[in-house]
């Protein structure tokens, strides 16, 4: 049986949970494979990508800062990655590299798995942030039939640019709390509230009690935003599931198996 290699390129990558996720599924489904980490500094991209290509990988994930840079080394980029404007998964086929993006899939699949019927939560959405995760969330929500989408970001020009590109509207960061009035889904795609980062300052007083709150930060598992939302009775969605479901899609693209996302996998990923 041939030995399959997949992996992750980025800088840094040592903290990544992906080897645990994919290693768990390799064992569970009896696949002779390994998942490697490739720490590639931006100044070494071209020679290091050539080295990775020489290893004959089945495919690999891509994280910051290479999600856009990687595109120039690919023979093809699929529709999902084109819509998001970034590649987070590469599939090798017949010596050619195809770029995809599984973040939108991970975002919406986890949201639906947690909340069930999404229809009540899609009419009016507020997204915090305007980076790659916000673009993925935007694509996923629009494809799911979201109505009015509003974006707010600390750098207002970034929010305006994303809003123009997607037909959404942008509001200044200073007006983020007023923008909560009447929304049905709040999504934090920023790193605010993550361990080691600045806290997210957001008073939820104007948030409707039936609105869902989705924080893609998963360290800590329960962010201050989710704790505040839970305390007032809002349905909440944590960030770990998005990580697991985007990995599920990548695993399928490489191995042809849709692996199960279950409690045992979460335990494996969260183990010290």
Image (cartoon, rainbow, N blue to C red):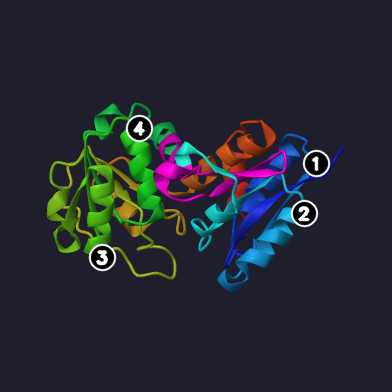
Q: Mark 4 points at which residue?
A: 143
Q: Mark 2 points at which residue?
A: 55
For the residues labelled 4 and 2, say whether their Cβ atoms are less than 8 Å apart. no
| Magenta stretch holds residue 103 | yes
Q: Distance between the residues labelled 2 and 3?
A: 41 Å
Which one is in front, 173 or 91? Answer: 91
Disc nearer the start of the sequence (2/3): 2
Tell me if I can see residue 237 in this picture: no
Instruction: Determine the residue positioned at 51% across, 61% down.
Output: 64
First-in-chain label (2 vs 1): 1
The residue wearing badge 3 is 155
Report the number of discs: 4
Label 2 neighbour load within 10 Å: few <14, some 14-19, many 20+:
few
Q: Can residue 15 be seen in this view?
A: yes
Between disc 3 and disc 1, whose residue precedes?
Answer: 1
Front label number (2 vs 1)? 2
**Number of the label disc, if any, that sits on residue 32:** 1
Q: Where is residue 207 in the image (x, y as percent from the top left)?
A: 18, 47
Q: Mark 3 or mark 4: name the one nearer the start of the chain.
A: 4
Residue at screen point 70% across, 47% down: 23
| Residue 218 higher or lower than 147, as above or below | below
Q: How crowded is mark 3: few (under 14 residues within 10 Å), some or many (20 or more)?
A: few
Callout in the foreground (3, 1) = 3
Element marked by disc 1: loop
What range is drawn magenta here?
A: 81-109
């Amino acid at each position: 049986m041939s030995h399959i290699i997949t992996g992750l390129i980025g800088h840094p990558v040592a903290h990544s949970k992906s080897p645990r996720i994919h290693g768990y599924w390799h064992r569970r489904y009896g696949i002779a494979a390994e998942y490697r980490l490739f720490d590639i500094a931006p100044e070494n991209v071209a020679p290091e990508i050539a080295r990775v290509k020489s290893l004959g990988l089945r495919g690999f994930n891509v994280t910051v800062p290479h999600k856009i840079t990687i595109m120039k080394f690919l023979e093809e980029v699929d529709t999902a990655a084109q819509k998001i404007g970034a590649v987070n998964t590469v599939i090798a086929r017949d010596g050619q590299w195809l770029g995809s993006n599984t973040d939108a899939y991970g975002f919406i699949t986890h949201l639906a798995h947690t909340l069930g019927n999404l229809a009540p939560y899609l009419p009016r959405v507020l997204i915090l942030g305007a980076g790659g995760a916000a673009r993925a969330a935007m694509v996923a929500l629009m494809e799911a039939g979201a109505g009015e989408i509003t974006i707010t970001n600390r750098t207002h020009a970034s929010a305006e640019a994303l809003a123009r590109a997607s037909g959404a509207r942008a509001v200044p960061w200073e007006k983020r709390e007023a923008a909560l009035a009447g929304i049905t889904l709040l999504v934090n795609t920023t790193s605010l509230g993550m361990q080691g980062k600045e806290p997210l300052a957001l008073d939820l007083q104007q948030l409707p009690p039936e609105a869902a709150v989705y924080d893609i930060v998963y360290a800590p598992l329960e962010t201050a935003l989710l704790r505040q939302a839970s305390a007032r009775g809002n349905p909440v969605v944590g960030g770990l599931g998005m990580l697991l479901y985007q990995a599920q899609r990548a695993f399928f693209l490489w191995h042809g198996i849709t692996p199960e996302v279950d409690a045992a996998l979460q335990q494996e990923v969260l183990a010290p």
